Image (cartoon, helix red, strand yellow):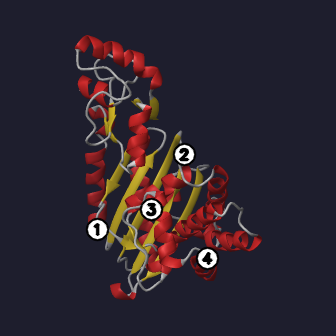
Amino acid sequence: MLATAALALAVTGTLSSGTVQAAVAPGTTGAADGGPGTDPGVLLRGLAACAAKAIVVGRNVAAYPSVLSRTLAAGQDLIALTTPQASSFRRPLTRTLDRYLDGVPGQVSVSVRDLSTGLSYSYNGGLRTAAASIVKVDVVMALLLKAQREGRDLTAWERRTTDRAIRVSDNAATTALWSAIGGGPGLSAANTRFGLRETAPDPGGAWGATTTSAADQVRLLTSLASPRSPLSAKNRRYLLGLMAGVAPEQAWGVSASGRGGADVALKNGWLPRERHGGRWTVNSIGRVRDRGHTYLIAVISHRHDTMGAGVHAVERVSRLVTDALATR
């Protein structure tokens, strides 16, 4: 463990047992950033000397700058090698979700990242659903990226149209924005910049039939919340502001993961699908700030008998997951 910490990345600031944790880029070997070699004495001195150079990427987890930048540039997720106590919530949480969802018709997947602790969790990660109206966040991000590339702000028409697409989930407005970004190819090009891997526009051009995963939606939210995003801070604030002001009747979903007074920016999607016999796809994504934590959370689901049943499942799963993370 000590050699891994020294060669790969990290030191928490002390060298007592259990305090050294690594965030390792898969496949990384050798000393990084001119770090220490493998001699134990040199390791200890080098770890202490390099602590000041590390960038904090989560609670008690730090990374050498060059390893962190290489990992992010390669589109790799950081793997946190933490103490058993820090990861012990995962198995009990999975069992809790299994028990709850065993009695719920349909399928549900959730992915969450706690920016305050660096912890993350995913459940049923293989599920792909139609994005429905959550794709509107992706479309607006693609438009903002296009405007940046052209060296301009959004036009007055673009601002009115993006406002309607996000705040009241206006479909006609979204169709107009879909054309403005170049349809499916334009969305795919933007998503490459945003680091998405599992999102595919519908070949027939129906934006709501774009397929996605919960993990990809958290990657999209990360591009919306992170200063490393290809989007400017101004554009990120603009879109998060729209998501924080959705129509009250559309403020359900991942908002259930927060208590009263939580700061929530979200977008929901809901769609009865003919291919599923009219059963409902219900999705919710967003950023939730609550009880000292900042969660990026995505819940996707399909094959619910009613929209209400889907909403209930999405909200219950959101609450179970963030309640578990809040105790870490």
Residue 264 is situated, as x and y percent measured from the top left of the image, at 58, 54
Which quarter of the figure has residue 99?
bottom left
Residue ID for mark 2:
290
Q: In the drawing, does residue 66 fall left or right of residue 147? A: left
Q: Nearer the viewer, mark 1 or mark 2?
A: 2
Residue 78 is situated, as x and y percent measured from the top left of the image, at 36, 43
Amino acid carrying mark 3 in the image: Thr
Amino acid carrying mark 1 in the image: Gly
Q: Contact, CB < 8 Å: mark 3 with mark 4?
A: no
- Does 236 appear above or below 170? above
Which numbered disc covers residue 72? none
Density class for disc 1 (Cα within 10 Å; few <14, some 14-19, many ≥20) is: few
Q: Nearer the viewer, mark 1 or mark 3?
A: 3
Residue ID for mark 3:
192
Which numbered disc covers residue 180? 4
> Which one is earlier in the sequence, the residue at label 3 or at label 4?
4
Q: Nearer the viewer, mark 1 or mark 4?
A: 4
Spatial CA distance of label 4 from label 2 is: 36 Å
Residue ID for mark 1:
103
Amino acid carrying mark 4 in the image: Ala
Q: Contact, CB < 8 Å: mark 2 with mark 3?
A: no
Spatial CA distance of label 1 from label 3 is: 37 Å
Density class for disc 2 (Cα within 10 Å; few <14, some 14-19, many ≥20) is: some
> Which one is earlier in the sequence, the residue at label 4 or at label 2?
4
